[in-house]
Image (cartoon, grey):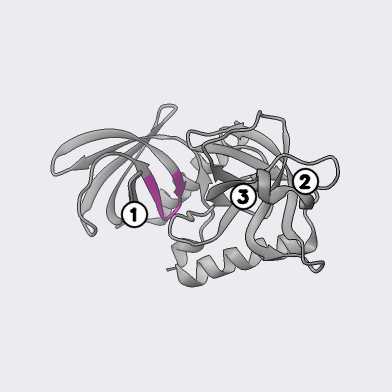
């Protein structure tokens, strides 16, 4: 499962899936050298081989892929029968997405956390210390993506871009027994919530993020 360790970027890029001879235009949610997650209503069974064409700014990358995951949001697809030239072309596309700011700065190395149990919550900062009232004002949020620098959170409520909030890791405490959290800047809104960049996270907070990512890789 080496490809699971490939860097992924969260970005919407046009892709055309051809399933049983029928083309279906859709968008990616994330992509790596090993595959993509396509946002689509199509639901071929796991193991199905499909043809796909990634289309972005005049470039077209064609490949065959296998359906490896079905969710309510779409399909996880793993490239098959592709060479190093194709993977290099995909990596070049990823680099271009980062360079032209199609991917939020500071939140680049993302991994799919749909099947991982880690949860977060967020709250506006308090004047007298967020630990005194966070349970009353916190908002639960699933993790769409996670890195040491930031996260994409799925939340019905969306604080304003540029706002500073406090993000907590559910079920984790710091050495003082307080909820483990970090201030974070809201850098953009997403279809499902918003993305944040952590502000001076503590060693304990970064350690918890690192362990979560290692656990994801071990389980993937």
Identify the residue position indicated by label 2 in the image.
199
Q: How far is disc 1 from disc 2 in space, using C-alphas? A: 36 Å
Identify the residue position indicated by label 1 in the image.
79
Mark 1 and mark 2 lie on one chain; the one further toward the N terminus is: 1
> Which marked residue is nearer to the observer: mark 3 or mark 1?
3
Identify the residue position indicated by label 3 in the image.
121
Mark linked to residue 179 = none
Is 215 included in the stretch rendered in magenta? Answer: no
Q: Is the C-beta separation of discs 3 and 2 under 8 Å?
A: no
Q: Quadrant of the N terminus?
A: bottom left
Q: Quadrant of the C terminus?
A: bottom left
Residue bounds of the magenta highlight: 30-37
x 27%, y 55%: residue = 66
Which picture quadrant has residue 57? top left
Is residue 147 in view?
yes
Secondary structure type for disc 1: strand
Q: How far is disc 3 from disc 2 in space, using C-alphas? A: 16 Å
Q: What secondary structure characterizes most of the magenta part?
A: strand
Residue 132 on image: x %, y %: 78, 51
């Amino acid at each position: 499962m080496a490809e699971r360790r490939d860097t992924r970027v969260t970005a919407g890029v046009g892709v055309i899936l051809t399933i049983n001879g029928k083309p279906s235009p859709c968008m990616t949610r994330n992509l790596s050298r090993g595959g993509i997650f396509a946002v689509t209503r199509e639901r071929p069974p796991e193991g199905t081989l499909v043809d796909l064409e990634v289309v972005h700014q005049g470039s077209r990358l064609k490949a065959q892929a296998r359906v490896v995951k079905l969710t309510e949001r779409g399909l996880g697809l793993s490239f098959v029968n592709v060479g190093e030239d194709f993977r290099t072309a995909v990596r070049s596309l990823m680099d271009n997405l980062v360079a032209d700011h199609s991917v939020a700065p500071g939140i680049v190395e993302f991994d799919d956390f749909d099947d991982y149990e880690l949860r977060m919550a967020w709250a506006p900062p308090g004047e007298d210390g967020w630990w005194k009232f966070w349970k009353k004002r916190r908002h639960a949020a699933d993790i769409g993506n996670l890195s040491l620098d930031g996260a994409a959170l799925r939340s019905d409520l969306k604080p304003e871009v540029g706002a500073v909030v406090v993000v907590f890791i559910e079920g984790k405490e710091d050495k003082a027994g307080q909820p483990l959290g970090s201030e974070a800047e809201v850098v953009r809104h997403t279809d499902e919530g918003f993305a944040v960049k952590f502000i001076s996270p503590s060693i304990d907070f970064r350690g918890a993020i690192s362990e979560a990512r290692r656990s994801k890789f071990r389980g993937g």
